[in-house]
């Protein structure tokens, strides 16, 4: 087995607000091997983006990483100084955000923005870096890169901007790429182009990928393994085939059955209704006791209201945090990691 | 602008089978865009450029397409938020909307809209009960206690606690707000509902609940829907018929099972094959579209899709294809399919 690039252990990122403590990321553990693609899925507010921001040490105030380890190629990122961290961001870990318009600087040309990263991390002159920028634009599939390199972000379409973001994220050959909802703002044909591009570049450059999305179909498309989050916790971790063929956690099952299938379905009256999940995502300030999912869970029993289940191993490639698969609960302060 | 190139005969046959509730005939909507270099030079954005279709009574008509294809503008013309540049809209067989017609107020009662963003479409300073009652006040439908009763009834119909009528919209979640939007749309007892991306801003688990609600309301109240969405999985799930738009025109229209199992237009095929499905087993090669949709400012003289089409031939670049019924109920505008 290939060595691990990233190991996240019992990561906790809390927000201390006047109304109380928001446990946005609450004991999350997972790892990514070299060249592997891991999908992090969940609905809004489940902590998936904050997990990524915590890895990059970009948690917005008043949030704080209060516990846990993020070990990247053997170094613990949580304990690095801000200066050392700057050398990691953009060089060893690249990141692509959801909104390419807000993450590109409107007053610089795209060439300058790619060149900035290259000259900062690789000590290249601006002129050399600008030349590199052209070849990166070509690599991410932009036609006429010699012209586009002088364009400002507003002159590009959403899909092209996202290609530029990918060029910026990859131009220093990172070992890990974190992509947070990289295709959510894009049309479906452009989404297919971008997902295809990511897969190609990942294969060519051997980069590990952490892809964060709310769209299960995107995960089915690009991920090797999947981590499902709910209310700040990992509820299931599985290989992509086990996750979709035999989802373990009732939340995962509900999530999968909520997605309409792209097939002729109308007319078969029995199958018309989507199964879905009752109720809604809980407020992180007032989380239910025990397992956070229990009020919405069709299979809940008494224990679920009192205790938080730990992550149980179902088979070689699947872990589920649900009392249907074991009886051990997590005591306060203990980690829920499968890697301990 | 020339004569419309649509053929009506075959659609007339369709109409006799089930009556059309709403018909759109050669609808055009151009927006004026001032040229960026010379301010005097006016250009037209051909957002909707000569489209025709019928919405049958009791059906869910899905309008698919990518951003900028004109699907939202079509919906806005139907509900009277835009005045069409040319063309007509018929409701129950009567011409009601046109370039030189005032939008009839009875139609505002009959046709209602559900908007995409439930955060932006509700007045934050209005109690939700009042927001739901407003259409009844506008149309003078029920008064006093009767109106209160209707509000309570509407709220429970969409799965909201009638007790919550004195709360404000910020006190509700996205899914609940969309339910408020739906009950408000139902307040004037409309027969047609235009739903523009009604579930796009919702989480998947909540999206499923709202889609179920829309289907249930249709069965209970005999509603007709025009569902506008870029999400093909949603459209495939709840539409009876699906129309696909590209660059301001319709490229294909057919029954759900028909269009999904054998799409004919090259654009429809590429669009459908871009949709990822929740099944890692079918991961594989897709018919990827190169390039991006054309600007609506300078539309090509031939087929709008010709520049990106993999099977385009000479004719496609100079001559716009006709909108033809190639199989019963299956309409396509493509030179290559019609051959």
Image: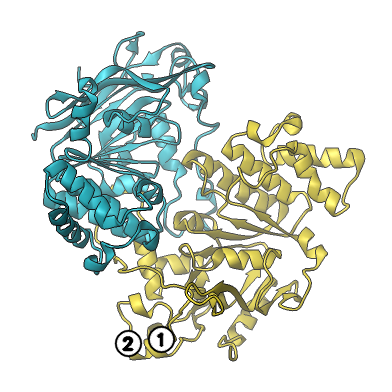
Q: Secondary structure at mark 2?
A: loop
Instruction: Choose mark 1 or mark 2, whichever is in front.
Output: 2
Percent position of residue B327, x then y? 48, 80
Residue at the spot x=22%, y=33% of the render?
A86
In the picture of the structure, the residue carrying the numbered disc 1 is B335
Q: Give the chain coloured yellow.
A: B
Decide which of B77, B54 is in the foreground and name it.
B77
Q: Residue at x 34, y 12 (%)?
A: A330
Crowd band around label 2 with a 10 angstrom C-alpha radius: few (<14), some (14–19), many (20+): few
Relative side of A319 to B45, left or right? left
Counting from the top left corner in percent of width and height, residue A322 is at: 37, 22
In this view, the residue in front, B130 or B213, is B130
Residue A91, above or below B85: above
Q: In the rendered structure, the residue with mark 1 lies on which chain?
A: B
In the image, which disc is placed on residue B193? none
Sequence order check: which comes first, mark 1 or mark 2?
Answer: 2
Which of the chains is cyan? A
Element on which disc 1 rests: helix
Q: Quadrant of the N terminus of chain A?
A: top left
Where is B25 relative to A61, above or below? below
- Residue to which mark 2 is pinned: B313
């Amino acid at each position: 087995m290939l060595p691990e690039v990233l190991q996240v252990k019992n990561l906790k990122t809390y927000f201390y607000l006047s109304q109380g403590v928001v446990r946005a990321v609450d004991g999350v553990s997972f790892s990514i091997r070299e060249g592997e693609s891991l999908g992090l899925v969940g609905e809004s507010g489940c902590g998936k983006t904050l997990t990524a921001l915590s890895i990059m040490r970009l948690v917005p105030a008043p949030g704080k990483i209060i516990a846990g380890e993020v070990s990247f190629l053997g170094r613990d990122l949580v304990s690095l100084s801000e200066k050392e961290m700057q050398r990691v961001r953009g060089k060893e870990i690249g990141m692509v955000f959801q909104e390419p318009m807000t993450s590109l600087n409107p007053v610089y040309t795209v060439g300058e923005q790619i060149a900035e990263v290259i000259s900062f991390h690789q000590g290249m002159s601006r002129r050399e870096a600008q030349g590199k920028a052209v070849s990166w634009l070509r690599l991410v599939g932009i036609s006429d890169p010699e012209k586009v390199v002088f364009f400002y972000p507003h002159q590009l379409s959403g899909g092209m901007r996202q290609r530029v973001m990918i060029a910026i994220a990859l131009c220093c050959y990172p070992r890990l790429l974190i992509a947070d909802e990289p295709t959510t703002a894009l049309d479906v044909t452009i989404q297919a182009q971008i997902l295809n591009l990511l897969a190609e570049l990942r294969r060519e450059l051997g980069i590990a990928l952490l892809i964060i999305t709310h769209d299960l179909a995107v995960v089915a498309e690009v991920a090797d393994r999947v981590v499902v989050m709910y209310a700040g916790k990992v509820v299931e971790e599985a290989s992509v085939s086990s996750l979709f063929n035999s989802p373990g956690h009732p939340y995962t099952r509900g999530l999968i059955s909520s997605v309409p299938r792209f097939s002729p379905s109308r007319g078969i009256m029995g199958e018309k209704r989507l199964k879905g999940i009752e109720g809604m995502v809980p407020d992180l300030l007032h989380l239910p006791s025990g397992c956070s999912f229990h009020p919405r869970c069709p299979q809940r029993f008494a224990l679920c209201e009192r205790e938080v289940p730990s992550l149980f191993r179902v088979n070689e490639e699947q872990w589920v945090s649900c009392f249907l698969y074991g009886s051990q609960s997590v005591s306060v302060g203990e980690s829920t990691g499968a890697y301990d | 602008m020339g004569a419309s190139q649509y053929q009506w005969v075959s659609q007339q046959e369709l109409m006799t089978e089930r009556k059309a509730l709403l018909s759109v005939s050669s609808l055009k909507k151009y927006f004026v865009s001032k040229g960026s270099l010379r301010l005097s030079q006016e250009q037209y954005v051909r957002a909707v450029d000569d489209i025709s279709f019928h919405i049958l009574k009791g059906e869910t008509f899905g309008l698919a397409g990518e951003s900028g294809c004109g699907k939202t503008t079509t919906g806005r013309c139907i509900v009277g938020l835009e005045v069409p540049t040319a063309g007509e809209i018929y409701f129950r067989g009567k011409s009601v909307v046109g370039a030189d017609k005032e939008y009839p107020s009875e139609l505002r009662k009959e046709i209602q809209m559900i908007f995409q963003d439930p955060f932006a479409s509700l007045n934050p300073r209005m109690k939700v009960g009042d927001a739901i009652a407003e259409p009844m006040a506008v149309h003078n439908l029920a008064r006093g206690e009767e109106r209160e009763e209707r509000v309570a009834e509407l709220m429970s119909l969409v799965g909201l606690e009638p007790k919550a009528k004195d709360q404000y919209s910020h006190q509700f979640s996205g899914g609940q707000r969309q339910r408020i939007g739906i009950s408000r749309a139902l307040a004037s007892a409309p027969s047609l509902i235009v739903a523009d991306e009604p579930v796009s801003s919702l989480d998947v688990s909540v999206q499923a609940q709202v889609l179920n609600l829309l289907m249930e309301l249709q069965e209970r109240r005999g509603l007709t829907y025009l569902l506008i969405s870029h999400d093909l999985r949603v459209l495939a799930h709840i539409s009876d018929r699906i129309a696909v738009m590209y660059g301001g025109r319709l490229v294909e229209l057919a029954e759900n099972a028909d269009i999904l199992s054998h799409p004919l237009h090259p654009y429809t095929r590429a669009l459908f094959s871009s949709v990822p499905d929740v099944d890692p087993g079918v991961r594989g090669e897709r018919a990827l579209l190169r390039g991006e949709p054309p600007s609506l400012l300078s539309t090509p003289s031939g087929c709008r899709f010709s520049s990106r089409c993999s099977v385009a031939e000479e004719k496609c670049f100079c001559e716009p294809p006709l909108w033809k019924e190639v199989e019963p109920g299956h309409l396509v505008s493509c030179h290559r399919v019609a051959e």
